[in-house]
Image: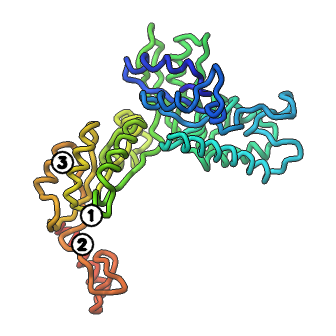
Amino acid sequence: TFDDNILNAGAATPILKARGLHATMYVVSGFADAPDAWNMDWGDLLTLRNSGWYISMRAGPLGRTIITPPQSQCPFFYGCRLPAENLTDYSARVTADLDDGIAAFRANGFNESLATFSLPFDYWNQDLQDPAVSTLLPGLLAAKFSVVFTEDAGFTPGYNRRYRFEIHGNTSLAAYQAALDDNRFSWAGISPATSPAPAALTTPTWVPPVQYIPVVSFSKLGGTGVSAAAFSDFVDLVYQAGYRTITVEKYIEWLEASPASFNALNASLPSRPIVIAFQGNDPNILVAASLLDRYSFIGNLFAAASITSPSMSWGDMQSLQGKGWSIQMTSGPLGLTVLSNPSCPNFYTCLTSDGETEPSFSARVASDLVGG
């Protein structure tokens, strides 16, 4: 990771690409709005993003400024109250700056999820001299970002705070190697395996955990659904943001992983996994599959067991499965049937209008699911 739109970070791109690696730039929107000789503007950041970097937020227009009173007291825009400022006004000021920063990202073409945040000036516990702010700030940040990074090794775990090791010009390779196995990177009480320090820098034995996996579902392409062009743009955006597709089976493994199995499972996942799903038998899903093929992406199809025109055939579904797709069920042979009950027509959730009992309803639904 790199902070503050630093201009010469772009020199890292060819070094990273040569090794198949990616990096993240944490951006101060105020610096991008009015760049100087040291900081990238929005155009520079778009170029960086398009070369494979992930771009997220470090501060809004004012979040990295030093406020009065002087630094010997409490100078941090996000971490301190202004003189005579009450907690309501403090919350409004911090939230407004975060919202303004997010709006600046959107206005300048960054529509991806700003999932992570790097706290300016690396304050957290001992630097927050106001106990009320120390309690309030984590919630303000958690409302906007899935993960908040701090280099403060002594911070109190909670909300979504995560430790980040800071590398300086005088950081040795030995110190960096030791940091790769630091248990402050642990998740859910799981500590990375400790390995002896090798003579030379090697691949870390532990992979940073996947914190969340987005699931996106499409029901139809074309007509009343998403156009093929819009879906193509979506696939491009997902790829450029660093996401890679997984099956729902792998997603369920991740959801249900025990502490004992989590490390091995986590190592088998892409660094930014996503589930792309389709519901129904729309034959245009085959068009979507060809668009996913451009990036060797796979999808997940929730199909109806009833094959009615227009529809993909069983052979089409087998072809998708052969590409690595997961084929699941959305209904049995009759599950898409509209019941004659005008107030409740859904086959799976409604009683028929002829006095159907609950046991009969259960038997009807179970029979259709088994038939599917």
Q: As shown in the figure, which amino acid type bears the numbered disc 3?
A: Gln
Q: Nearer the viewer, residue 214 or 281?
A: 281
Q: Nearer the viewer, residue 316 or 348?
A: 316
Q: Is residue 320 left or right of residue 179?
A: left
Q: CA distance from mark 3 to mark 2?
A: 23 Å
Q: Is residue 340 left or right of residue 6?
A: left
Across and down, in percent, residue 358 comes to 32, 84
Q: Is residue 152 above or below residue 224?
A: above
Q: Quadrant of the C terminus?
A: bottom left
**Residue at the spot of label 1:** 330
The answer to the question of whether label 1 and label 2 lie on touching residues, with beta carbons closer than 8 A, is yes
Q: Nearer the viewer, residue 159 or 86?
A: 86
**Residue at the spot of label 2:** 335
The answer to the question of whether label 3 and label 1 lie on touching residues, with beta carbons closer than 8 A, is no
Q: CA distance from mark 1 to mark 2?
A: 8 Å
Numbered disc 3: secondary structure: helix
Numbered disc 1: secondary structure: strand
**Residue at the spot of label 3:** 321
Q: Residues within 10 Å of mark 1 (few under 14, many from 20)?
A: some
